[in-house]
Amino acid sequence: MKSVVVLGATGSVGRSTLNVLARHPDRFRVAALTANTDHEGLLAQCLETHPELAVLVDSDGAAALEAGLRKAGLKTEVLTGPQALVSAAELAGADVVMAAIVGAAGLLPTLAAVKAGKRVLVANKEPLVMCGGLFMSAVRASGAELLPIDSEHNAIFQCLPGGYRTGEMPRGIRSVLLTASGGPFRDWPLADMGSVTPAQACKHPNWSMGRKISVDSATMMNKGLELIEACHLFSLEPEAIRVVLHPESIIHSMVEYADGSLLAQMGQPDMRTPIACGLSWPERIEAGVASLDPIEIGRLNFQPPDHERFPALKLAESAIRVGEGMPVVLNAANEVAVADFLAGRHGFMRISERVDEALNAFDGARSQDLDTVLALDTEVRHWMGVSPREGSA
Ligand code: NAD
Ligand code: MG
């Protein structure tokens, strides 16, 4: 019996994780659940799973959560504040931590889970983008097991040789092909992209996801972040990774070997597949995902990405090539610009423009120690117009 902590339990990945766990009460027990402000959602999840610890960052909501738990006769301990996320991540007795918080807010708890030597299932890509080097050395030092849940990285992991551990340089690899759907605006007339609304940007053709990653998919910054994520997880140079548009989201990524073999992982666009894979690896368990029928699909398509339409991809490529603090600048500027777009403060095309402006304003020549990364993250958010008290890692 493995006991599991779900960071970001009320989100899209968090809910899919609980869905998979509920199918295997003989294998998994929920040890702790965390959320930001959704106390009602977290209460409902606690009533179903009876964790020993529940963390709600928002203190007012935490009081309501505690009242609801006591009313139902549950003994679940309730903690509040960002530091409590770290307590959940390093919970004694927990074997597996699902990192499914969105954005830089997941950095410290995910790193704490790694340092505590857990099996860490990483959906939350932003911390890896900000300081992947630091993560991978913490993995080596603690002996933690880091398994990628982002569907592309999970696909790459599945296509690597048996026994491969993340962070190692894979042998015999020619390249990695990172597939991208192109999001909702792949075929829109370029002239109409200026008037995109948040609701349109959040309506992904193939995947149902949280709002921030949905906007990232629409700008294709998501693929840029994933390129950086892949460099760290699989010890690859950016030149070894090629982004390929694949509108159907059936092939989740591919690995090309020196002998000319091209291995692909296919499946329905349903996060329960990579989540179940990470939970049970190297075994396989039922995830509730429908079979994929190649005859029904009929045809798969591939095309190159359109860099005029999606400038974010090149911005991410240049940030990882320069390295050091540049991915921190890229990520922080993007988080602020996406939040501003979602709040109706500016248009869709301004997101990539503002990220570009931030990359030009900072030289990013910083070391990769944690304090420097966090300070740069705060500095960039401040430069983008966020007051120092508001969200940063
Ligand atoms: P979401 O917005 O649906 O959920 C986010 C979760 O994080 C919620 O539980 C929320 O309460 C919590 N959270 C938000 N801000 C927080 C803060 N400041 N402190 C503590 N908790 C906070 O997001 P999602 O779509 O589930 O994505 C989660 C992560 O997984 C993201 O990094 C995303 O890029 C990655 N990811 C998601 C998918 C997907 O299909 N949704 C696929 C691949 C990768
Ligand atoms: Mg992905």
Image (tube, grey):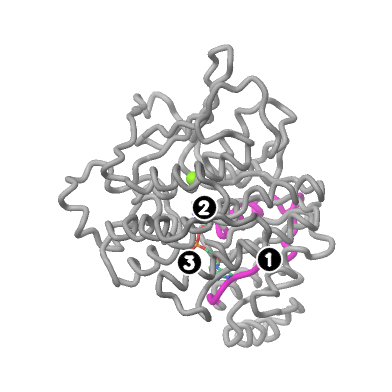
**Disc ID at residue 380:** 3
Say whether residue 284 is magenta: no
Does 194 appear above or below 291? Answer: below
Q: Amino acid at mark 2?
A: Pro
Q: Position of residue 237 (x, y in %)?
A: 56, 34
Q: Position of residue 246 (x, y in %)?
A: 37, 33
Q: Which residue is mark 2?
A: 327
Q: Residues within 10 Å of mark 2 (few under 14, many from 20)?
A: many
- Distance CA(mark 1)–CA(mark 3): 39 Å
**Disc ID at residue 350:** none
Return the residue nearer the eye: 238 or 242.
238
Region of the chain picked out in magenta, as a range: 14-38
Which residue lies at the image location 55% right of the left edge and 47% below the top edge?
A: 323
Q: Are marks 2 and 3 in contact (CB under 8 Å)?
A: no
Residue 39 appears in which quarter of the rendering?
Answer: bottom right
First in sequence, mark 1 or 3: give its number: 1
* Closer mark to the observer between disc 1 and disc 3: 3
Q: Amino acid at mark 1?
A: Thr
Q: Residues within 10 Å of mark 3 (few under 14, many from 20)?
A: many
Q: In what element is the residue under mark 1?
A: helix
Say whether residue 18 is magenta: yes
First in sequence, mark 2 or 3: give its number: 2
Which residue lies at the image location 67% right of the left edge and 61% below the top edge?
A: 370
Q: Residues within 10 Å of mark 1 (few under 14, many from 20)?
A: some
Which residue lies at the image location 27% right of the left edge and 44% below the top edge?
A: 309
- Distance CA(mark 2)–CA(mark 1): 37 Å
First in sequence, mark 2 or 1: give its number: 1
